[in-house]
């Protein structure tokens, strides 16, 4: 009788231990002891690049953000207004729930407890991030000399897109109504982009296509939206909830194949992606 009771106690302890282990191994945000459903595993689209300002509303769940990215499975993703802990969580969901594994590099421009949480003495890092299915090299992270009302900058990496090595830039320019500041920022960015025969420039430029501060970028590269040009004759699809085009995939020495803009409830900026011809 004592042996039977001890056996039952031991069995109960094993079950509890297993539940704890399962709960710990489940993706963060999953109910205790229950894994989230796993979508069918698929590969990334090797010649597809995406840009997305993921904040506003900033508190949206990263599970939803990951699902939006997984719908299009780009090779390279440029994120703006990104907290490091959010990006890490998105990567976790992309791999564990969607079978999409990404490397990551960061372009942090400030430490922000208000935006990114963390302890007041150790706030979360905030800025840009690049996710790539292929490894990345030669990362640079540059803060603009004048960020405007908030620190801003660009980052750049070299990675494989469509089987070819390409220099990829990711930036977020100063807020609206700071045209002179953005002009200085695009000057800094354009000088670096001009050093490369083939480059992809992703980002939230906070400026419409015919804004004077974008002149230097247009002189070096073309937007992947073939109908969008910096003139009154261009027809540019809006990329924001307020019907302005602020988000761009600029190409230098590379041709686009297909450009898409997808509104999403998880940000006031739309997902923008393009497939490239790198033959």
Image (cartoon, rainbow, N blue to C red):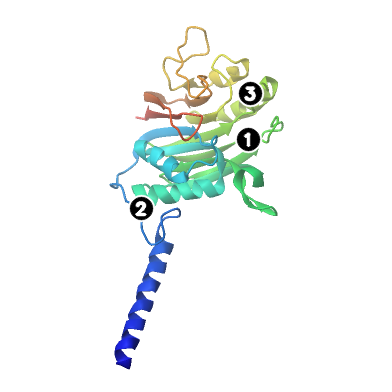
Q: Is residue 43 visible?
A: yes
Q: Which type of secondary structure does the marked residue at label 3 adopt?
A: loop
Q: How many marks?
A: 3
Residue at which label 3 appears: 176
Q: Which type of secondary structure does the marked residue at label 2 adopt?
A: loop
Residue 120 appears at what percent x and percent y? 69, 52
Residue 50 appears at what percent x and percent y? 44, 33
Number of residues whose C-alpha sits closer than 10 Å to that of mark 3, classed few (under 14), some (14–19) or many (20 or more): some
What is the CA distance from the residue labelled 2 to the residue labelled 1? 36 Å
What is the CA distance from the residue labelled 3 to the residue labelled 2? 40 Å
Q: Residue furthest front?
A: 1
**Residue closest to the eye, 160 or 120:** 120
Whether tag 3 and tag 2 are in contact, CB under 8 A, the answer is no
**Residue closest to the eye, 73 or 164:** 73
Number of residues whose C-alpha sits closer than 10 Å to that of mark 2, classed few (under 14), some (14–19) or many (20 or more): some
Q: If you read the primary sequence from the N terminus, does the residue marked by circle 3 or circle 2 appear first?
A: 2
Residue at which label 2 appears: 36
Decide: is 218 above or below 84. Answer: above
Residue 51 appears at what percent x and percent y? 47, 32
Residue at which label 1 appears: 153
Q: If you read the primary sequence from the N terminus, does the residue marked by circle 1 or circle 3 appear first?
A: 1
Q: Which type of secondary structure does the marked residue at label 1 adopt?
A: strand
Q: Residue furthest top?
A: 233
Q: Quadrant of the N terminus?
A: bottom left
Residue at left 70%, top 54%?
Answer: 121
Residue 49 appears at what percent x and percent y? 42, 33
Locate residue 141: give its quadrant: top right
Q: Nearer the viewer, mark 3 or mark 2?
A: 2
């Amino acid at each position: 009788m004592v042996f039977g009771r001890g056996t039952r106690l031991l069995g109960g302890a094993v079950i509890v231990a297993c539940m704890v282990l399962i709960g710990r191994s489940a993706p963060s945000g999953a109910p205790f002891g229950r894994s989230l459903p796993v979508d069918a595993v698929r590969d990334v689209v090797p010649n597809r690049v995406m840009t997305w300002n993921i904040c506003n509303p900033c508190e949206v769940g990263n599970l939803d953000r990951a699902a939006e990215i997984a719908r299009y499975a780009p090779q390279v993703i440029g994120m703006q207004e990104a907290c490091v802990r959010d990006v890490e969580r998105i990567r976790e969901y992309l791999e564990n729930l969607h079978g999409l594994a990404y490397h990551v590099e960061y372009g942090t421009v400030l430490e922000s407890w208000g935006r990114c949480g963390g302890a007041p003495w150790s706030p979360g890092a905030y800025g840009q991030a690049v996710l790539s299915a292929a490894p990345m090299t030669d990362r640079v992270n540059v803060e603009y000399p004048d960020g405007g009302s908030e620190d801003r900058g660009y980052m750049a990496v070299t990675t494989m897109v469509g089987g070819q090595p390409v220099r990829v830039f990711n930036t977020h320019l100063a807020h609206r109504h700071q045209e002179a500041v953005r002009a200085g920022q695009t000057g800094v960015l354009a000088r670096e982009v001009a050093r490369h025969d083939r480059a992809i420039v992703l980002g939230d430029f906070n400026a419409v296509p015919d804004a004077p501060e974008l002149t230097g970028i247009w002189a070096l590269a073309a937007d992947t939206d073939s109908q969008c040009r910096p003139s009154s004759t261009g027809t540019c699809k809006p990329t924001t909830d307020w019907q302005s085009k602020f988000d761009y995939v600029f190409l230098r020495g590379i041709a686009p194949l297909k450009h898409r803009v997808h509104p999403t409830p998880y940000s006031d900026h739309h997902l923008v992606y393009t497939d490239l011809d790198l033959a």
